[in-house]
Amino acid sequence: MDLNKDLKDIHLNINSTTFNILYRKYKSFVLPSIIIIACIILFFIVIIPQVQAVLDAKEKERIEKQKLELFKNNYNLLLNMDIVKLNSDFEMLTKTLPSGKDFAGIINSISDKSVKTGVRIGDFEFTVGDISKPAEGATSFPSMQISLDVSGKPKAILDFVKQLYKSMPLSEITTIEQGGESARINIQFYYKAFPQGPISNESPISAFTSDDRSLINELSSWGVVNEAKFIPLSPSVSEDSSESGSLEASSSAEGV
């Protein structure tokens, strides 16, 4: 007789009996437990992703509604704009603060103001830097410096300086060295580059504020610079990227 085999059979019989007893006792809980487990699995696999998808769809809908509202506002603003006035303002503002080094505008401005105030422009020198280099950036205000000798009565020279402050392109007098009826004036003429790259169609368009309109009206009151007839001497170019020469404005300039 194999004792080990008998013990094994007894152990299997006990386990089978125990399982049958437990099954009969908890039979009514088996099916609900399976259903609950299946529901939990479905909740994590199906329901939660669906809820997240609905939330994402609502967020996209909100963003698209904002874009649509922005497009409507931009369209209405453009529709109600006076194109003629807008072009006039743009032309005037670009003359005041050009997008690049406006040599012709600077010379015309100096010549025009010299004729109006009765001063004579002598030697001049302007530092241009690398003329092939693009503007430094849309957020900076690069400038070009001009040094010029003027002669005339002290009051006329003072009037000339005042007139330059209200001229196009925008300028700033940095230093004045005056002696008798002559003076050496250093002037910074400013410009500003247009923004680089394409403009997003999702950018909002803003109308001019009251402060903007006041500034534009003030700039308009300066008047358009008359293109005075001047006789420039051939400038000499030096290695420090500066040019020099002289300029004589004729009293027969237009508008004088």
Image (cartoon, helix red, strand yellow):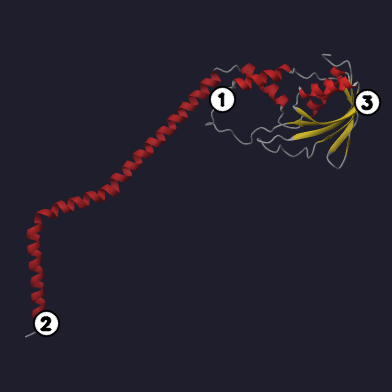
Query: Measuring 40% from the left and 36% from the top, which residue is drawn there?
Result: 59
In primary-sequence order, the first of circles 2 and 3 is: 2
Please state the horizontal and vertical placement of residue 90, each as a whole percent of the image.
66, 23
Q: Quadrant of residue 211?
A: top right
* Mark 3 residue element: loop
Query: Measuring 24% from the left and 50% from the top, which residue is drawn there?
Result: 40
Q: Nearer the viewer, residue 148 or 32?
A: 148
| 66 on left or right of 147 | left
Residue type marked 3: Gly
Query: Measuring 61% from the left and 18% from the top, which residue is drawn there?
Result: 83
**Would you call the spot at circle 2 few (<14 residues within 10 Å), some (14-19), or many (20 or more)?**
few
Gap in angstroms between the C-alphas marked 1 and 2: 95 Å
Gap in angstroms between the C-alphas marked 2 and 3: 132 Å
Q: Which residue is mark 2?
A: 4
Q: Can you tell which of label 1 and label 2 is closer to the viewer?
A: 1
Q: Quadrant of residue 207?
A: top right
In primary-sequence order, the first of circles 1 and 2 is: 2
* Proximity of marks 2 and 3: CB atoms separated by less than 8 Å: no
In primary-sequence order, the first of circles 3 and 1 is: 3
**Would you call the spot at circle 1 few (<14 residues within 10 Å), some (14-19), or many (20 or more)?**
few
Residue type marked 2: Asn
Please state the horizontal and vertical placement of residue 130, each as a whole percent of the image.
78, 40
* Mark 1 residue element: loop
Q: Nearer the viewer, residue 183 or 230?
A: 183
Mark carried by residue 206: 1
Residue type marked 1: Ser
The residue at the far bottom in this view is 1
